Image (tube, grey):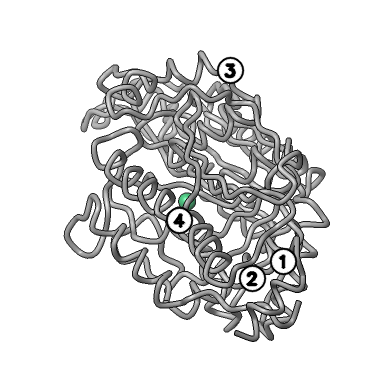
Amino acid sequence: MTDLPMIDAQRLWDAHMALAEVGRIPGDGVCRLAASVEDKAGRDLFARWCREAGLVVRVDRIGNMFARRAGKDESLPPVLIGSHLDSQPTGGRFDGAFGVLAGLEIVRTLDAAGIATTAPIELVNWTNEEGCRFQPSSLGAEVAAGHIALADGLAAKDENGIRLGDALEAIGYLGTADVALKARAYLEGHIEQGPILEEKGEAIGIVGGSMGVNAYSVILIGREDHTGTTPVQRRKDALFGAARCIAEVRALALDFEPNGRATVARILAEPNARSVVASKVTFTVDCRHQGEDELNVMTGRLREIIERISHECGLSFTMEPYWVVPPRSFDATCVAALRSAAAALNLTSRPMVSGAGHDAIPIAAVVPTAMVFVPSRDGVSHHVSEYTTPEQLAAGCNVLFRAALELAVIADPVAADDAATR
Ligand SMILES: [Zn+2]
Protein backbone atom coordinates (compact mmCIF):
# COMPACT_ATOMS: atom_id res chain seq x y z
CA MET A 1 0.00 0.00 0.00
CA THR A 2 3.02 2.27 -0.38
CA ASP A 3 1.49 4.01 -3.42
CA LEU A 4 -1.54 5.26 -1.56
CA PRO A 5 -2.25 8.98 -1.88
CA MET A 6 -1.71 11.33 1.05
CA ILE A 7 -4.56 13.25 2.61
CA ASP A 8 -4.84 16.98 1.83
CA ALA A 9 -3.38 18.74 4.88
CA GLN A 10 -4.64 22.18 3.86
CA ARG A 11 -8.19 20.93 3.25
CA LEU A 12 -8.16 19.21 6.65
CA TRP A 13 -6.97 22.41 8.35
CA ASP A 14 -9.50 24.56 6.49
CA ALA A 15 -12.31 22.28 7.68
CA HIS A 16 -11.13 22.70 11.29
CA MET A 17 -11.03 26.48 10.91
CA ALA A 18 -14.47 26.61 9.27
CA LEU A 19 -15.97 24.45 12.02
CA ALA A 20 -14.24 26.60 14.67
CA GLU A 21 -16.38 29.54 13.49
CA VAL A 22 -19.43 27.64 14.77
CA GLY A 23 -19.96 28.57 18.41
CA ARG A 24 -16.79 30.63 18.37
CA ILE A 25 -15.86 32.36 21.65
CA PRO A 26 -13.09 34.89 22.41
CA GLY A 27 -9.52 33.57 22.41
CA ASP A 28 -9.99 31.11 19.51
CA GLY A 29 -12.21 28.79 21.54
CA VAL A 30 -15.59 27.22 20.85
CA CYS A 31 -18.73 26.60 22.88
CA ARG A 32 -20.90 23.88 21.37
CA LEU A 33 -22.69 22.27 24.29
CA ALA A 34 -24.46 19.03 23.38
CA ALA A 35 -27.85 19.53 21.70
CA SER A 36 -27.56 23.34 21.84
CA VAL A 37 -28.18 25.66 18.87
CA GLU A 38 -24.40 25.81 18.38
CA ASP A 39 -24.23 22.01 18.35
CA LYS A 40 -27.01 22.04 15.74
CA ALA A 41 -25.03 24.47 13.59
CA GLY A 42 -21.92 22.27 13.84
CA ARG A 43 -23.96 19.18 12.99
CA ASP A 44 -25.61 20.99 10.05
CA LEU A 45 -22.24 22.00 8.63
CA PHE A 46 -20.86 18.46 9.01
CA ALA A 47 -24.00 16.99 7.41
CA ARG A 48 -23.73 19.43 4.48
CA TRP A 49 -20.08 18.48 3.90
CA CYS A 50 -21.00 14.80 4.06
CA ARG A 51 -23.85 15.17 1.54
CA GLU A 52 -21.59 17.18 -0.76
CA ALA A 53 -19.22 14.19 -0.63
CA GLY A 54 -22.10 11.94 -1.67
CA LEU A 55 -22.47 10.29 1.74
CA VAL A 56 -25.82 9.11 3.04
CA VAL A 57 -26.47 10.72 6.42
CA ARG A 58 -28.64 9.15 9.10
CA VAL A 59 -29.31 10.04 12.72
CA ASP A 60 -30.10 7.48 15.36
CA ARG A 61 -32.55 7.73 18.25
CA ILE A 62 -29.95 9.23 20.62
CA GLY A 63 -28.79 11.78 18.03
CA ASN A 64 -25.60 10.02 16.91
CA MET A 65 -24.91 10.98 13.27
CA PHE A 66 -23.60 8.49 10.72
CA ALA A 67 -22.51 9.31 7.15
CA ARG A 68 -22.03 6.33 4.88
CA ARG A 69 -19.79 5.82 1.88
CA ALA A 70 -20.93 2.64 0.19
CA GLY A 71 -18.60 -0.32 -0.14
CA LYS A 72 -18.37 -2.77 -3.02
CA ASP A 73 -19.86 -5.37 -0.71
CA GLU A 74 -22.76 -3.73 1.06
CA SER A 75 -23.43 -6.87 3.07
CA LEU A 76 -20.27 -6.17 5.10
CA PRO A 77 -20.47 -4.07 8.25
CA PRO A 78 -18.76 -0.67 7.87
CA VAL A 79 -15.48 0.66 9.18
CA LEU A 80 -16.47 3.54 11.47
CA ILE A 81 -14.32 6.66 11.80
CA GLY A 82 -15.25 9.54 14.05
CA SER A 83 -15.41 11.29 17.40
CA HIS A 84 -17.58 14.16 18.67
CA LEU A 85 -18.51 17.72 17.66
CA ASP A 86 -19.79 18.92 21.04
CA SER A 87 -17.42 20.87 23.29
CA GLN A 88 -16.83 22.10 26.80
CA PRO A 89 -18.28 25.58 27.56
CA THR A 90 -14.83 27.09 27.00
CA GLY A 91 -13.48 24.39 24.72
CA GLY A 92 -10.89 24.38 21.99
CA ARG A 93 -11.05 23.88 18.23
CA PHE A 94 -9.59 20.38 18.02
CA ASP A 95 -10.99 18.22 20.84
CA GLY A 96 -13.45 15.89 19.12
CA ALA A 97 -13.48 17.91 15.91
CA PHE A 98 -10.23 16.27 14.77
CA GLY A 99 -11.61 12.72 14.86
CA VAL A 100 -14.73 13.67 12.90
CA LEU A 101 -12.99 15.91 10.36
CA ALA A 102 -10.18 13.36 9.85
CA GLY A 103 -12.91 10.91 8.81
CA LEU A 104 -14.33 13.45 6.38
CA GLU A 105 -10.86 14.12 4.95
CA ILE A 106 -10.33 10.38 4.47
CA VAL A 107 -13.53 10.17 2.42
CA ARG A 108 -12.59 13.24 0.39
CA THR A 109 -9.16 11.71 -0.31
CA LEU A 110 -10.70 8.40 -1.39
CA ASP A 111 -13.07 10.26 -3.71
CA ALA A 112 -10.32 12.40 -5.23
CA ALA A 113 -8.24 9.28 -5.89
CA GLY A 114 -11.17 7.22 -7.13
CA ILE A 115 -10.57 4.48 -4.57
CA ALA A 116 -13.39 2.09 -3.74
CA THR A 117 -13.37 -0.04 -0.61
CA THR A 118 -14.85 -3.49 -0.16
CA ALA A 119 -16.48 -2.66 3.16
CA PRO A 120 -18.47 0.57 3.55
CA ILE A 121 -16.93 3.45 5.48
CA GLU A 122 -19.08 5.40 7.90
CA LEU A 123 -18.23 8.67 9.60
CA VAL A 124 -19.73 9.16 13.04
CA ASN A 125 -20.40 12.10 15.35
CA TRP A 126 -21.35 10.79 18.80
CA THR A 127 -23.84 12.75 20.93
CA ASN A 128 -22.80 14.42 24.19
CA GLU A 129 -19.24 13.18 24.58
CA GLU A 130 -18.16 15.98 26.90
CA GLY A 131 -20.69 15.29 29.61
CA CYS A 132 -20.82 18.91 30.72
CA ARG A 133 -24.45 19.58 29.76
CA PHE A 134 -25.83 16.05 30.21
CA GLN A 135 -24.32 13.25 32.29
CA PRO A 136 -22.68 10.89 31.86
CA SER A 137 -20.05 11.73 29.27
CA SER A 138 -19.97 9.72 26.01
CA LEU A 139 -23.71 9.28 26.42
CA GLY A 140 -24.41 8.67 22.73
CA ALA A 141 -21.64 6.07 22.50
CA GLU A 142 -22.71 4.42 25.77
CA VAL A 143 -26.24 4.01 24.41
CA ALA A 144 -24.92 2.71 21.07
CA ALA A 145 -22.78 0.19 22.97
CA GLY A 146 -25.83 -0.93 24.94
CA HIS A 147 -24.39 0.12 28.31
CA ILE A 148 -27.14 2.68 28.91
CA ALA A 149 -30.75 2.07 27.90
CA LEU A 150 -32.05 4.44 25.21
CA ALA A 151 -34.90 5.65 27.44
CA ASP A 152 -32.46 6.47 30.25
CA GLY A 153 -30.16 8.33 27.86
CA LEU A 154 -33.02 10.40 26.47
CA ALA A 155 -34.19 11.17 30.02
CA ALA A 156 -30.83 12.66 31.10
CA LYS A 157 -31.49 16.24 32.22
CA ASP A 158 -29.34 19.35 32.05
CA GLU A 159 -29.14 21.78 34.98
CA ASN A 160 -32.30 23.54 33.75
CA GLY A 161 -34.25 20.29 33.81
CA ILE A 162 -34.31 19.96 30.01
CA ARG A 163 -34.27 16.34 28.83
CA LEU A 164 -31.67 15.30 26.27
CA GLY A 165 -34.46 13.80 24.15
CA ASP A 166 -36.34 17.12 24.10
CA ALA A 167 -33.17 19.11 23.41
CA LEU A 168 -32.31 16.82 20.47
CA GLU A 169 -35.84 17.11 19.11
CA ALA A 170 -35.68 20.90 19.40
CA ILE A 171 -32.57 21.05 17.21
CA GLY A 172 -33.89 18.47 14.73
CA TYR A 173 -31.47 15.70 15.67
CA LEU A 174 -33.67 13.18 17.42
CA GLY A 175 -33.35 10.60 14.67
CA THR A 176 -35.20 7.41 13.92
CA ALA A 177 -32.35 5.03 13.11
CA ASP A 178 -31.81 2.07 15.42
CA VAL A 179 -29.11 2.73 18.03
CA ALA A 180 -27.74 -0.81 17.80
CA LEU A 181 -24.24 -0.77 16.39
CA LYS A 182 -22.82 -3.17 13.84
CA ALA A 183 -19.36 -2.32 12.57
CA ARG A 184 -16.24 -4.05 11.34
CA ALA A 185 -13.96 -1.62 13.19
CA TYR A 186 -13.98 1.79 14.85
CA LEU A 187 -11.06 4.21 14.52
CA GLU A 188 -10.94 7.47 16.46
CA GLY A 189 -8.40 10.23 16.10
CA HIS A 190 -8.09 12.63 19.01
CA ILE A 191 -5.76 15.24 20.42
CA GLU A 192 -3.68 13.77 23.23
CA GLN A 193 -4.84 16.29 25.87
CA GLY A 194 -1.57 15.64 27.68
CA PRO A 195 2.10 16.61 27.30
CA ILE A 196 3.78 13.29 26.47
CA LEU A 197 3.99 13.35 22.65
CA GLU A 198 5.21 16.94 22.60
CA GLU A 199 7.73 16.26 25.37
CA LYS A 200 9.10 13.19 23.57
CA GLY A 201 9.04 14.88 20.17
CA GLU A 202 6.87 12.12 18.71
CA ALA A 203 4.16 12.53 16.08
CA ILE A 204 1.68 9.79 16.85
CA GLY A 205 0.29 8.03 19.90
CA ILE A 206 -0.98 4.54 19.12
CA VAL A 207 -3.59 4.08 21.83
CA GLY A 208 -3.84 0.47 22.91
CA GLY A 209 -6.41 0.89 25.66
CA SER A 210 -7.77 3.01 28.44
CA MET A 211 -7.13 3.36 32.13
CA GLY A 212 -9.63 1.89 34.53
CA VAL A 213 -11.27 4.30 36.95
CA ASN A 214 -12.29 3.79 40.57
CA ALA A 215 -13.67 7.10 41.77
CA TYR A 216 -15.10 7.64 45.24
CA SER A 217 -17.10 10.18 47.12
CA VAL A 218 -15.61 10.33 50.64
CA ILE A 219 -17.44 11.90 53.57
CA LEU A 220 -15.65 12.66 56.84
CA ILE A 221 -17.84 13.40 59.85
CA GLY A 222 -16.52 15.27 62.88
CA ARG A 223 -18.11 17.82 65.20
CA GLU A 224 -18.90 21.51 65.05
CA ASP A 225 -16.99 23.56 67.62
CA HIS A 226 -16.21 27.21 68.20
CA THR A 227 -12.91 28.16 66.54
CA GLY A 228 -12.07 30.60 69.32
CA THR A 229 -12.91 28.60 72.40
CA THR A 230 -12.20 24.95 71.56
CA PRO A 231 -8.56 23.88 72.03
CA VAL A 232 -7.19 22.19 68.93
CA GLN A 233 -6.56 18.83 70.61
CA ARG A 234 -10.23 18.58 71.65
CA ARG A 235 -11.59 19.09 68.12
CA LYS A 236 -12.98 16.59 65.64
CA ASP A 237 -12.01 18.69 62.66
CA ALA A 238 -13.24 17.11 59.43
CA LEU A 239 -11.46 19.68 57.28
CA PHE A 240 -8.12 18.95 58.91
CA GLY A 241 -8.74 15.24 58.28
CA ALA A 242 -9.55 15.99 54.65
CA ALA A 243 -6.39 18.05 54.26
CA ARG A 244 -4.28 15.14 55.53
CA CYS A 245 -6.12 12.75 53.19
CA ILE A 246 -5.50 15.05 50.21
CA ALA A 247 -1.78 15.17 50.95
CA GLU A 248 -1.60 11.37 51.22
CA VAL A 249 -3.61 10.86 48.02
CA ARG A 250 -1.00 12.92 46.23
CA ALA A 251 1.76 10.73 47.67
CA LEU A 252 -0.23 7.67 46.57
CA ALA A 253 -0.47 9.11 43.05
CA LEU A 254 3.28 9.66 42.91
CA ASP A 255 3.87 6.04 43.95
CA PHE A 256 1.88 4.85 40.91
CA GLU A 257 3.29 7.20 38.27
CA PRO A 258 3.53 6.96 35.29
CA ASN A 259 0.77 4.39 34.72
CA GLY A 260 -1.62 5.49 37.45
CA ARG A 261 -3.23 8.68 38.71
CA ALA A 262 -4.98 9.67 41.93
CA THR A 263 -6.64 13.03 42.39
CA VAL A 264 -8.81 14.96 44.82
CA ALA A 265 -10.50 17.60 42.67
CA ARG A 266 -13.70 18.53 44.47
CA ILE A 267 -14.33 19.37 48.11
CA LEU A 268 -17.24 20.69 50.13
CA ALA A 269 -16.85 21.71 53.79
CA GLU A 270 -19.83 22.15 56.09
CA PRO A 271 -21.06 24.32 57.62
CA ASN A 272 -18.38 26.32 55.75
CA ALA A 273 -18.65 29.12 58.30
CA ARG A 274 -15.64 31.18 59.34
CA SER A 275 -15.92 30.58 63.08
CA VAL A 276 -17.09 26.99 63.12
CA VAL A 277 -14.85 23.92 63.01
CA ALA A 278 -15.98 21.88 59.99
CA SER A 279 -18.16 18.95 61.04
CA LYS A 280 -18.56 17.40 57.62
CA VAL A 281 -16.35 17.35 54.54
CA THR A 282 -17.23 15.65 51.28
CA PHE A 283 -14.53 15.18 48.66
CA THR A 284 -13.87 13.06 45.59
CA VAL A 285 -10.92 10.76 45.01
CA ASP A 286 -10.40 9.70 41.41
CA CYS A 287 -8.01 6.73 41.02
CA ARG A 288 -6.98 5.54 37.55
CA HIS A 289 -4.62 2.86 36.36
CA GLN A 290 -4.10 0.86 33.18
CA GLY A 291 -3.75 -2.39 35.13
CA GLU A 292 -6.71 -3.90 36.94
CA ASP A 293 -4.59 -5.40 39.74
CA GLU A 294 -2.70 -2.15 40.30
CA LEU A 295 -5.99 -0.24 40.36
CA ASN A 296 -7.25 -2.57 43.07
CA VAL A 297 -4.04 -2.11 45.06
CA MET A 298 -4.42 1.68 44.76
CA THR A 299 -8.00 1.50 45.93
CA GLY A 300 -7.02 -0.68 48.89
CA ARG A 301 -4.34 1.79 49.91
CA LEU A 302 -6.79 4.65 49.53
CA ARG A 303 -9.21 2.96 51.92
CA GLU A 304 -6.38 2.39 54.39
CA ILE A 305 -5.44 6.10 54.23
CA ILE A 306 -9.00 7.29 54.84
CA GLU A 307 -9.49 4.78 57.66
CA ARG A 308 -6.23 5.61 59.44
CA ILE A 309 -6.59 9.38 59.21
CA SER A 310 -10.24 9.27 60.28
CA HIS A 311 -9.23 7.23 63.31
CA GLU A 312 -6.36 9.56 64.21
CA CYS A 313 -8.58 12.64 63.88
CA GLY A 314 -11.56 11.18 65.76
CA LEU A 315 -13.77 11.19 62.66
CA SER A 316 -16.16 8.70 61.13
CA PHE A 317 -16.24 8.23 57.39
CA THR A 318 -18.05 6.78 54.39
CA MET A 319 -16.47 6.00 51.03
CA GLU A 320 -18.88 5.31 48.15
CA PRO A 321 -17.92 4.67 44.53
CA TYR A 322 -19.55 7.07 42.06
CA TRP A 323 -17.70 6.00 38.91
CA VAL A 324 -16.19 2.59 38.21
CA VAL A 325 -14.79 1.65 34.81
CA PRO A 326 -12.51 -1.34 34.23
CA PRO A 327 -9.31 -0.83 32.21
CA ARG A 328 -9.99 -1.66 28.56
CA SER A 329 -7.69 -3.04 25.90
CA PHE A 330 -8.34 -1.99 22.34
CA ASP A 331 -8.41 -4.46 19.46
CA ALA A 332 -5.02 -5.92 18.52
CA THR A 333 -5.75 -5.93 14.77
CA CYS A 334 -6.84 -2.29 14.76
CA VAL A 335 -3.85 -1.27 16.88
CA ALA A 336 -1.51 -3.16 14.53
CA ALA A 337 -3.07 -1.46 11.48
CA LEU A 338 -2.40 1.96 13.03
CA ARG A 339 1.13 1.02 14.06
CA SER A 340 2.09 -0.25 10.61
CA ALA A 341 0.49 2.81 9.00
CA ALA A 342 2.65 5.10 11.13
CA ALA A 343 5.74 3.04 10.28
CA ALA A 344 4.95 3.10 6.54
CA LEU A 345 4.71 6.89 6.76
CA ASN A 346 8.03 7.12 8.65
CA LEU A 347 6.28 8.84 11.53
CA THR A 348 7.60 8.51 15.07
CA SER A 349 5.04 6.88 17.31
CA ARG A 350 4.66 5.49 20.80
CA PRO A 351 2.19 3.11 22.40
CA MET A 352 -0.11 4.97 24.80
CA VAL A 353 -2.98 4.32 27.17
CA SER A 354 -5.77 6.86 27.40
CA GLY A 355 -6.24 8.40 30.83
CA ALA A 356 -9.18 10.48 29.62
CA GLY A 357 -12.64 9.30 28.64
CA HIS A 358 -13.39 8.91 24.93
CA ASP A 359 -16.24 7.57 22.82
CA ALA A 360 -13.89 4.79 21.73
CA ILE A 361 -13.88 3.33 25.25
CA PRO A 362 -17.52 2.21 25.41
CA ILE A 363 -17.49 1.36 21.69
CA ALA A 364 -14.47 -0.92 22.24
CA ALA A 365 -16.74 -3.25 24.21
CA VAL A 366 -18.82 -4.02 21.10
CA VAL A 367 -16.69 -3.16 18.05
CA PRO A 368 -12.95 -3.80 17.36
CA THR A 369 -11.52 -0.37 18.17
CA ALA A 370 -8.32 1.65 18.38
CA MET A 371 -7.33 5.31 18.67
CA VAL A 372 -4.65 7.66 17.39
CA PHE A 373 -3.43 10.62 19.44
CA VAL A 374 -1.81 13.70 17.95
CA PRO A 375 0.21 16.15 20.09
CA SER A 376 -1.43 18.89 22.16
CA ARG A 377 0.63 22.07 22.53
CA ASP A 378 1.70 22.31 26.19
CA GLY A 379 -0.63 19.38 26.87
CA VAL A 380 -3.55 21.82 27.04
CA SER A 381 -7.16 20.89 26.28
CA HIS A 382 -10.67 21.87 27.41
CA HIS A 383 -9.39 25.41 26.99
CA VAL A 384 -9.58 28.04 24.27
CA SER A 385 -5.80 27.92 23.73
CA GLU A 386 -5.83 24.23 22.76
CA TYR A 387 -3.64 23.84 19.66
CA THR A 388 -2.27 21.23 17.31
CA THR A 389 -0.37 22.22 14.15
CA PRO A 390 -1.75 21.55 10.65
CA GLU A 391 1.17 19.16 10.06
CA GLN A 392 0.46 17.20 13.25
CA LEU A 393 -3.23 16.88 12.35
CA ALA A 394 -2.30 15.75 8.84
CA ALA A 395 0.10 13.11 10.18
CA GLY A 396 -2.63 11.66 12.41
CA CYS A 397 -5.12 11.74 9.55
CA ASN A 398 -2.71 9.94 7.21
CA VAL A 399 -2.26 7.18 9.78
CA LEU A 400 -6.03 6.82 10.14
CA PHE A 401 -6.43 6.86 6.35
CA ARG A 402 -4.05 3.95 5.79
CA ALA A 403 -5.37 1.94 8.70
CA ALA A 404 -8.97 2.50 7.56
CA LEU A 405 -8.08 1.29 4.07
CA GLU A 406 -6.40 -1.79 5.46
CA LEU A 407 -9.47 -2.57 7.57
CA ALA A 408 -12.03 -1.70 4.87
CA VAL A 409 -9.90 -3.38 2.15
CA ILE A 410 -9.32 -1.73 -1.21
CA ALA A 411 -11.87 -3.27 -3.57
CA ASP A 412 -10.00 -2.71 -6.78
CA PRO A 413 -6.22 -2.53 -6.37
CA VAL A 414 -5.77 -1.66 -10.06
CA ALA A 415 -7.96 1.40 -9.68
CA ALA A 416 -6.02 2.38 -6.58
CA ASP A 417 -2.68 2.06 -8.39
CA ASP A 418 -4.03 4.12 -11.29
CA ALA A 419 -5.19 6.77 -8.89
CA ALA A 420 -1.85 6.88 -7.14
CA THR A 421 0.08 7.38 -10.36
CA ARG A 422 -2.31 9.91 -11.89
ZN1 LIG B 1 -12.84 14.80 23.11
Badge nearest the viewer, 2 or 3:
2
Q: Identify the element where label 2 is drawn.
A: helix
Relative image position of residue 18 (x, y in whole percent):
29, 62
Q: Looking at numbered disc 3 in the image, what kind of residue is underneath it?
A: Ala
Residue 338 shows which numbered tag? 1
Name the residue nearer the viewer: 332 or 410.
Answer: 410
Residue at the spot of label 3: 149
x, y percent for residue 186: 67, 49
Q: Can you say whether 90 is above or below 314 in the image? A: below
- The image's mark for residue 89 is none
Q: Amino acid at mark 1?
A: Leu
- Locate the N terminus and report the quarter of the image it occupies: bottom right
Identify the mark at residue 399; answer none if there is no mark.
2
Q: Is residue 348 left or right of residue 292?
A: left
The local secondary structure at tag 1 comes to: helix
- Tags 1 and 4 touching, CB below 8 Å: no
Some atom of ligand 1 lies within 8 Å of the CB belonging to the residue at label 3: no
Count of numbered circles on the image? 4
Q: Earlier in the sequence, mark 3 or mark 1?
A: 3
Q: Residue furthest left?
A: 26
Identify whether 73 is placed above or below 389: above
Amino acid type, callout 4: Ala
